[in-house]
Amino acid sequence: MDGGRAGERVRAAIRVEGTVQGVGFRPFVYGLATRLGLDGLVGNDERGVFIEVEGASALVGEFTSALRDGAPPLAAVERVAAVPVPVTGRSGFAVVPSPPGGRRRALVTPDAATCADCLRELDDPADRRYGYPFVNCTNCGPRFTIVTDLPYDRPNTTMAGFAMCGDCEREYRDPADRRFHAQPVCCPACGPRLRLLGPAGREPAPPPPSSTAPGGAVPKGAVPKGAASDGAASDGAVLDAAAALLRAGAVVAVKGLGGYHLAAVAACGPAVAALRARKRREDKPFAVMAADPEAARRLCEVDEAAERLLTGAARPIVLLRRRPGARLAPRVAPGDRWLGVMLPYTPLHHLLLRRVGEPIVLTSGNLGDEPIARDDGEAVARLGGVADAFLAHDRPIRARADDSVVRVFRGGPLPIRRSRGYAPRPLPLPRPAPRPVLACGAELKHTFCLARGGRAFVSPHVGDLENHETFRSFTEGVAHLRRLLGITPRLVAHDLHPEYLSTKYALALEGVDRTGVQHHHAHVASCLADNGVAGTVIGVAFDGLGYGADGTLWGGEFLVADLAGFERAGHLATVPMPGGAAAVRQPWRMAAAHLDAAYAGDVPGDLAVVRRNAGHWEAVVALARRGVNAPLTSSVGRLFDAVAALAGVRDVITYEGQAAAGLERLADEDERDGYGCRLTGGAPFTVPGAELVRAAAEDLRAGAAPGTVAARFHNGLAAAVAAGCERLREARGLGTVALSGGVFQNVLLLERTVALLEERGFTVLTHRRVPPGDGGISLGQAAVAAARDRLGRPPASASPSG
């Protein structure tokens, strides 16, 4: 549509698809059209947003371009298509109702952090929402966590019980207002309110006079009088009381967007210690919420990339390098030079942090591997023994969504946990699914995925699928997301491990076809889908454990793979896991197995790991040699455990991946030497981990610093990956490598590996939108299922399609 601003009058029918409903897209279109003096209409339908616009051809062209370039912050425009239609000559621009008929498929957007406009209102004494902890608009606020059904209208959210006042109603109906059809719109006159309750969930009692001594722990149940928001006390008074409790050393359960958190002042040693003891979380680091980027900088090194992540709409926890001397209690992140930091993402958090005046620990409101508490009654029942008080509110949470976690890699995000702020935003499938797919995921770091056509919807983080509560959260989540998206699966993908609860769930479903997807193939397919690649690649999948196609435990795999199939082209040499699951909990057992292999049974007795475990060493080695309760594994995760124990990091762990993470933290990043490791065998080749272990052991015996040993191990393993990929390029002519699996959450290993591969001319694919760990498995399963379905491939297929 060419011509000047006063050129020929034209009319265009425009279709916009993507995440364009419930994100302020219609007010944006209305404002854009009226600013340009164009006539026409805009509305929602089952496919997205439809527009008709009429005016000078140049202005219509400018309008069409701006639909993608100037879209609202929460929108994700996937497609804009415009076709000419006859000019009508009708004047004015209107927002029109959705047409009758057709099944709506609006894409529910993730929850988003409070926008700058709402923060200005929050801080403006003249504004009617001044200090109101639930201020929101079409550019921010709760979304996925409050939706009960579609279409996405207020009656189908947990705001249904809050009737809008006249002022909110006027904003909601005004197309020129940024709260036009903002379903959670509310204010102090008509919206949710806060209340502060004691540990039993009842009206709080006044604290004893001695309970508020600075830095001291508050006796359980000690909540200030008058803290319940019952109409007599304001939300501000409730926040004042909660902040006073935190400053006095209390643990407070705080109801957020997707569930409850447990909070304590991050610099208060007794409070953090009490939280650890009550939550039964011995060592795993706590996340910290800081009020703003400047407060975060006082705790950690924050570069430009990290600040973008910290301040973005998703507001994830970002793992950052901790500053020496940062004002934190020692038990916040024991012995860790990395700290998980996030900024406030709701008005409630902003207001609370301002009143507390310093960073707070904010960790998931759960015990052990349970899902995050969502309902008020559930929170009181499960967290009553942990929290001294509950900062609650009366807006129900429909869908759980724990905080997302990311690391910074090469200026962008490396997801560790994809949840609040990201899910369930759709991801494109490289090969569209002919039939709707449910991918049931794995076990640890569990997510599931629903796919239809070219879109995949990965659920928020569920947790470790090892108990009834988490399994129930999984099944409820599947039912809820199916209903929201209108997806009825016809093909179900699952892991090959027969004992995973997700596998058992898949096999129990009726009226569906099923396809089993090997764990490490799913990892590689996840990386392919993350990067929009469908061709054959060298896939390197390193993780803790996964059920192999031969029934053994894999975890150090070089695959020649595409979306539909794979061939195992190489792997880490297998070693026994003495004691089975006990070898995961006690990394020294893996050190014993690897050292026994490295030294052919003649392990030097002067190694510290041998001396520390002398009482059980021979018995464990005997288990390994006899193969009794000692399954063979090619796991790189278990190799990391072995070297971590050897270097003195951990002999016993209290959470999954602890020893490996400690080895990364220990490594001297300036060390560039690496241990040699010669590939052996033909097809498949093997990577002899024993050579890496023996080199590390001899270095330690010669007096090398553990940090030097840790670094040389990382560098040697990266070199082994590069050598394996070079061998496969020579044999297969493949120049693209996909790196996946939980081991590649290790940024040091990832950086060294990517650098070596790029030096050798490879194109390297890494994760940017889903985790390389098991949180990304479900996307890989969905991509595999879709590709196989398109090819008519039988479920058990294992070879790439070429």
Image (spheres, rainbow, N blue to C red):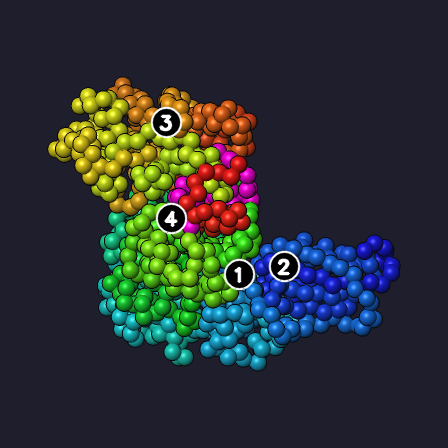
Disc 4 residue type?
Asp
Q: Secondary structure at mark 4?
A: strand
Residue at horizontal 22 percent and vertical 30 percent from the top: 592
| x, y percent for residue 122 | 52, 66
Q: Secondary structure at mark 2?
A: strand
The residue identified by callout 3 is 686
Mark 4 residue crowding within 10 angstroms, few (<14) / some (14–19) / many (20+): many
> 636 or 433, which lies in front?
433
Q: Is residue 661 visible?
A: no
Mark 3 residue crowding within 10 angstroms, few (<14) / some (14–19) / many (20+): many
Mark in front: 3 vs 1: 3
Q: Earlier in the sequence, mark 4 or mark 1?
A: 1
Q: Is residue 243 left or right of residue 211?
A: right
The residue identified by callout 1 is 109
Q: Quadrant of residue 386?
A: bottom left
Circle 4/circle 2 CB separation < 8 Å:
no
Q: Is residue 49 visible?
A: yes
Q: Secondary structure at mark 1?
A: loop
The residue identified by callout 2 is 17
- Looking at the image, which residue sits at the far left? 615
The residue identified by callout 4 is 495
| x, y percent for residue 12 | 77, 62
The N terminus lies in which quarter of the figure? bottom right
Mark in front: 1 vs 2: 2
> 153 or 264, which lies in front?
153
**Magenta span:** 515-540
| x, y percent for residue 252 | 33, 62
Mark in front: 4 vs 1: 4
